[in-house]
């Protein structure tokens, strides 16, 4: 029963987080798309694709990284090292957030944005109306190919530089914790031990 309750809580959390991110990001991009020209819209689309690829790299790096190189840095109080150990120890959660939640949301956004760009192009240049199906198909194919190629290149980079990537992510999170005063990576059990079992190197 405890496992089922935990599973349902996790599923509900993932659903609500995905829904919230999709609504916020969707509204934001839709408003920007309506108030910008085609060139700016294309830049926004590229940014969304880069975010998608970037988080995919982080998710893969989290599963490929090991704790050992970061423990010594954490002992020496290197900024971000403790956060990196936490992230690597919870690699499954990091990968789920980066690859599944952020990846799927940005993927859906890029698809919607490409459709909006095509519609804007047809409204701006009515003469292209007779080629709508080809323009739409080429836009979708271009977005898909850029995303897939970027992820393929990023996967190799993530595996080869996993510890370095996670170290940088940990450093960024450490700075965010300092700025906001919130602690995202210091969940502890009774007795002061960090939650989660250590990853085997």
Image: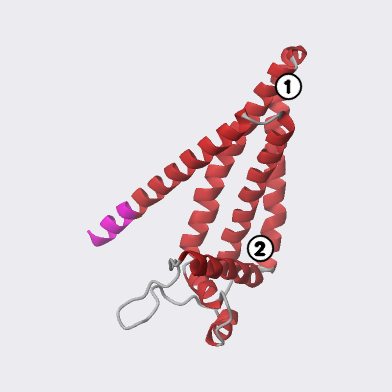
Residue 69 at x, y = what percent?
60, 81
Q: Residue at x 56, y 32 (%)?
A: 31
Circle 1 residue = 134
Mark sitting earlier along the chain (2/1): 1
Compute the Cα span from label 2 to label 1.
Answer: 35 Å
166 in magenta: no
Residue at point 48%, 72% (across, down): 86
Which residue is more in the foreground, 170 or 9?
170
Q: Which SS type dominates the magenta stretch?
A: helix
Quadrant, the N terminus? bottom left
Callout 2 environment at 10 Å: few (<14), some (14 to 19), or many (20+)?
many
- Compared with 156, 106 (above or below) is above
User: Residues at badges 2 and 1 in contact (C-beta under 8 Å)?
Assistant: no
- The residue shown at (60%, 34%) is 32
* Magenta highlight range: 1-9
Residue topped by disc 2: 158
Q: Position of residue 174 (x, y in %)?
A: 53, 70
């Amino acid at each position: 029963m405890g496992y089922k309750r935990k599973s349902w809580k996790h599923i509900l959390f993932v659903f609500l987080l995905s829904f919230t991110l999709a609504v916020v990001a969707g509204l934001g991009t839709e408003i920007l798309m309506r108030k910008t020209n085609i060139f700016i819209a294309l830049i926004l689309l590229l940014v969304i694709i880069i975010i998608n690829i970037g988080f995919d790299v982080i998710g893969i790096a989290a599963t490929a990284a090991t704790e050992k190189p970061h423990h010594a840095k954490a002992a020496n109080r290197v900024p971000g090292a403790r956060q990196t150990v936490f992230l690597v120890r919870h690699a499954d959660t990091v990968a789920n957030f980066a690859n599944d939640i952020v990846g799927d949301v940005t993927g859906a956004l890029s698809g919607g944005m490409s459709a909006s760009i095509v519609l804007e192009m047809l409204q701006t240049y009515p003469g292209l109306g007779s080629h709508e199906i080809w323009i739409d198909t080429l836009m979708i194919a271009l977005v898909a190919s850029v995303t897939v190629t970027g992820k393929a290149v990023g996967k190799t980079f993530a595996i080869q530089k996993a510890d370095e990537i996670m170290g940088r992510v940990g450093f960024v999170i450490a700075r965010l914790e300092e700025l906001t005063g919130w602690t995202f990576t210091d969940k502890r059990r009774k007795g002061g031990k960090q939650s989660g079992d250590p990853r085997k190197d």
